[in-house]
Structure formats: C-alpha cells, structure tokens
Image (spheres, rainbow, N blue to C red):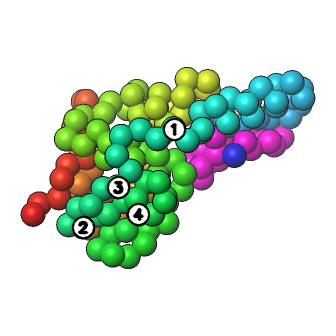
Amino acid sequence: MIVVTARSSEIDRVRAFELGADDYLTKPFGLRELTDRARAVLRRTRFEPVGESVYEGRLLTADFAAVDVRVEGCPIRLTRREFQILRCLVENRNRVMSRDRLLDRIWGSGEPVEARTVDVYLGRLRAKLGTAGGQIETVFGLGYRFVEDPG
C-alpha cells in the first residue's frame, strides 16, 4: 500500500508505516515518481516461495502457502508485514536475524526505513501470537531469533 497525502510530518509517516504502509508519498508529486514507487512496491512484495511452506509446533502452526497462522488452533490475523517477518524468522529458526537483515528482506532497499520499525512490528507480532510470542527471542545487540517451542 502506498499512502499518498498532503501530510508530511514525521509522526504521520511513522504512523502510516506502523499501520502497514509500504511507501509514503507527499503532494506534490509527479506521475512518474508514483509509477516508479508502485513498481518498487510490487517488486519487493512479489511472492517468492523460499524454504518450507508449513511450520507445525506445539503452540504455533503456520501454512505460509495458504497464509494461515494459528496459535493453539485459533486463527491469528496478521498484517502482510507481520506475516513476512514471521515467515522470515521461522524459515531461519534458531538463527539470529539482525534488524538490518530483516529490513532488507521485508522492506527492501528502495525506501529508507528506520531500524526501530522492526522493533515496532515485532512487538505487535508477539502480542498477536500471545502464548507463542515467546518463541521470538530478542538477542540483545544482535537481533531476533525464532526458537522451537518447548516440547
């Protein structure tokens, strides 16, 4: 989603990104710039199957191909970015993913995004995952890691 608006304050931009915006464009702008930004968003969000498509743990199950995430059998609604972060962490489970690596994998390198944006999204993701949110560990000074739930 690209937000096109006359509002240009930092708080407006941050709020839009927190709500799931992929890009933020303030007026006035040229049609070519809007077209290029739309192409960049499409390029970054193109689905590319990587790794496994299903994760089954004691608390969390995720079918990435079907875009279905459940905690203890209950469906969880995630934003596209939250889903992408979860998928990236699960596919790289037990490995630390730095903020910069997550930013590059999820947001791409087209638009500068603050590294702390990852923290905001991870906080919301953990909250939505409830009991399974603890499987996403913060590795201080390094990044984040998804760990298998205790058997």
How many residues crowd mark 1 within 10 Å: few (<14), some (14–19), many (20+)?
few
Q: Amino acid at mark 4?
A: Val
Residue 69's label in the rendered image is 4
Front tag of 3 and 2 = 3
Q: Which residue is mark 3?
A: 54
How far apart are labels 1 and 3 at the CA level? 15 Å
Magenta range is: 2-22
How far apart are labels 1 and 4 at the CA level? 18 Å
Q: Secondary structure at mark 2?
A: loop
Q: Position of residue 92 (x, y in %)?
A: 29, 38
Residue at 24 percent of width and 34 percent of height: 96
Q: Which residue is mark 1?
A: 48
Task: Choose the circle earlier in sequence order: 3 or 2.
Answer: 3
How far apart are labels 4 and 3 at the CA level? 10 Å
How many residues crowd mark 4 within 10 Å: few (<14), some (14–19), many (20+)?
many
Q: Which residue is mark 2?
A: 59
Residue at 60 percent of width and 44 percent of height: 17
Q: Secondary structure at mark 1?
A: loop
- State yes or no: discs 3 and 2 in contact (Cβ < 8 Å): no
Task: Choose the circle earlier in sequence order: 4 or 2.
Answer: 2
Q: Is residue 56 magenta?
A: no
Q: Position of residue 93 (x, y in %)?
A: 24, 43
Front tag of 1 and 2 = 1
Task: Choose the circle earlier in sequence order: 1 or 4.
Answer: 1
How many residues crowd mark 2 within 10 Å: few (<14), some (14–19), many (20+)?
many
